[in-house]
Amino acid sequence: MSRAGQALRTSYLVASVAGVLFFALSVALLGAWPARLLEAQTAAMAPEKPLEPTTSEKRGRAIYAREGCAYCHTQQIRYLHADMARFGAPTLAWETRRDTPHLWGTRRIGPDLSRVGGARSLDWHYAHLYAPRAIVASSVMPGYPALFDGGPDRPRQDARDLVAYLESLGRARELAGPEGEARAREGCNCPDDEMQQMAFEGPLNAHPARAVRTREAAPALSGGDLARGQALYGRHCATCHGTTGAGDGPGARSLVPAPAKLAEHVYTTERLADVMWHGVAGSAMPAWRDYSTGDRAALALAVQALSAPRPEPDVPAHLVGLGREVYTANCVQCHGANGDGRGSAADKLTMAPANFTVQRLSLTEAVRVLREGVHGSPMAPWTTRLTDAERLAAAHYVRSLFRMTPAATEAR
Amino acid sequence: MSVAFGLVAAWQLIAPDLGRDVAWLGWGRVRYAHTQGIMLGWLANAFFAFLYHAVPILTGRPVTSARLGVWIFALWNFAVMAPGWMLVLAGVSQPLEWAEFPLVVDVVAILALALAGVQFLPGFFRRGVESLYVSSWYIIGGLVFTLLSYPMGNVVPEFLPGAAGAAISGLWIHDAVGLFVTPMALAIIYFVIPAATGRPVFSHFLSMLGFWLLFFLYPLNGTHHYVYSVIPMAAQLTAIVASALLGVTVVIVVTNLFLSMRGAGLLPADPALRFVGTGTFFYVIVSLQGSAQAQMSVNQTVHFTDWVVAHSHMAMLGFASFAAAGGLVHAWQRMPEARYNARAITWAYWMLVIGLVGMVVDLTIGGLVQGELWKSGAPWIDSVTASRVYWVARAHIGSILAAGFIALLVGLTTGPRGAGMVVRPAPAADGHDEVAPRLAPVTEAL
């Protein structure tokens, strides 16, 4: 063999060994070393007793994996302010320690789901999984009717497991609370690492749809473009509340409590601002915080326009005074003495009692609610305790508590 | 089949209730079948087929055993692809990108790859490594490194939690392309160009430089799929730097390839050369795009969007499928028994070019729109409604691509036998000698 051939042979041998070493290097440097570091990080930053997944959640996870949910929904909030503003705190290593195999995903067609737990109500999830477009009109998500027994209100075990899994996403860190965050920050030991510090800034869960029960005032709304509001209403609200506001949209069927019959109510702008900003905790009504102030103002106008002005019914003479008596005896504990929904028991209820000063039901609707209650809320039917006349009187009375603000009057 | 799965998935994005009551037609499952099918069903089969043409010429001796070949074919198609597809559609899968076939199928795939090593590699070593042409190196590298990376990417992340699993998964996403698809595609391109033009490659030195740099750098790219994640920044930065260097390497490789093709014209008359030339063009575009999108400033906008879907189509279709099609046509031109339909091949070429360019342009713009809308803070659903027009276009363009692949199938299965022949079969038993001198081994250049 020639000298050149021999030299070439040797250099190829060196290169081949180097090639294998580069592969080994990639596995070591980009696989094994990060794995060890992440393991150490997990040990140092995880809460002392982190929440473990239940059997149902594990089964739900398998369904999520099987159906390729991760190919449209990522589970990885990046260390980027744009991601954090939309989804919340960046994903920490310890949060993914039971995530085997990982479901991070590399494509977002739908939103990231890392912190979707608590962002939606269970009935919303069921209705949405069964027929996504019955809830979100322009969604492109496939429906999963096979997880149900013929209807969104009849979830099979599979649907329950999947929703249990979705509800668990982000919950471990949330439940770890401020102590958990403090422990993580300390375990991170990264005071000078600007990027890692981002994990602890901003709200933990920034889901714009998450309903919050609070008395904090929502950003005020004024003005607004009615035509735009009606277009937005048609696109986003009609699926549940119905095109005419009768509460009979395609998504309404399985929601408990049922979507509000907007046409049967007169709302102050403040009330609508509050609902769109905070959602209605305990119901499927999400918050719409990701919509601009202008859009929310426009939507408020569109909702107010749904209830046609009608002549105010007079209180029959024999019922004057009775309403107040009935209300004081039966309703104040929840709805409060002046009807503002701040009774002594209000805070203990899953859903905030109605505040009659900011919304007025039509008389027929008020009578119906008193007779039938609000299924899925603490409001019970009052047929055993109250007579027909008493319920009618109470209906008249709660309607009289409404205080129309100048803004709403003007809008109407 | 794989293109059909892709087409179904594309249509489901604009008609989401398509296949609503058929569990196995769920979007996620169909997508699993699409990508696994393209890589393992279409490309791997095409590569193996080409190896049966190229390896005897490159080594000067037949492959190990014809019977082993039947076994590899049967294993790959009836024990990997068929059960793989059936299982993912039935809901038995692993949610790891480019690795969705379940473990039981992975075991068979690894066995089949090992057998392919036994089938194709011994001849190279008997010939002596000092006189191997660059295609031989790519074939050796592709088979050996796939055997290493396949178990790493398909098995390990199944058992590693969260972030650590994602790190390994990211490596495989790139190794599948870089250590399996790319070497095989380049082996074809390097083989077809000199064989079709009748001239040796421009520079054997550059070809070998490119080969080794690719194998050094490709494995270090993987973590760029998880930029801005909790995976240690040092690892992310390593991958980002390696991605930039990889772009440089590809420029070296492609310069060499284009210089080897000089004189053949922009649109070579030989359809095989036309396919590989176009594949080379898309290779440099997709690689430079890859280097750019790994950079943090670009990545933060385009990551998670359709931009990346466009990128992977340019890689797997524009680069690898064009190379594979070129390789098959080239082999068909040298088989007197093979049916060949020249018109269908021409149709296939144009439909694939138009479809691919259309899809890449469409999804790249769509991806930028999505990225900007996400940054703007607009409600999420706005990015979905804004995407619709691009998805509608993509679904229709997908039909052109499907037609292109059907035309390719027609071109290789209909028409008179031997109609594609450009080389008369050699009179002697050592028929390989007719082509082999043009693939001048490196030593002759020294």
Image: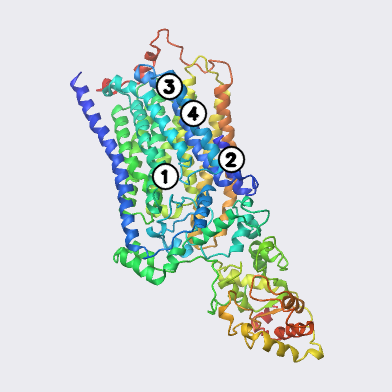
Dot 4 falls on which chain? B
Q: For the residues carrying marks 4 and 1, which lies nearer the camera in this image?
A: 4
Residue A399: image quadrant is bottom right
Amino acid bearing label 4: Ala
Could you tell me residue B100's position as x and y percent? Answer: 48, 42
Q: In this view of the protein, can residue B385 be seen by the observer?
A: no
Q: Earlier in the sequence, mark 2 or mark 4?
A: 2
Q: Are marks 1 and 3 on the same chain?
A: yes
User: Against A333, is B140 above or below?
Assistant: above
Viewer-closest of B39 and B245: B39
Task: Specify the amino acid type for callout 2.
Answer: Leu
**Which image quadrant is residue B1 in?**
top right
Give how far apart the Cα atoms at labels 4 and 3 are.
25 Å
Residue drawn at (32%, 41%), measured in percent from left and top?
A: B217
The residue to which callout 1 is attached is B289
> Which comes before the other along the chain, label 4 or label 1?
1
- Badges 4 and 3: C-beta atoms under 8 Å apart? no
Tell us which disc is closer to us: 1 or 3.
Answer: 3
Q: Nearer the viewer, mark 1 or mark 2?
A: 2
Kindly state the secondary structure of the residue where label 3 is placed. Answer: helix
Q: Are marks 4 and 1 on the same chain?
A: yes
Q: Decide: marks 4, 1 in contact (CB < 8 A)?
A: no
Rate crowding at label 1 as few (under 14), some (14 to 19) or many (20 or more) other CA atoms within 10 Å: some
Which label sits in the foreground, 2 or 4? 2
Choose top left, top right, bottom left or bottom right for residue A232.
Answer: bottom right
The residue wearing badge 2 is B7
Q: Residue at x 55, y 76 (%)?
A: A218
Please report whichever mark, 1 or 3, sits nearer to the chain's N-terminal start: 3
Tag 3 residue? B68
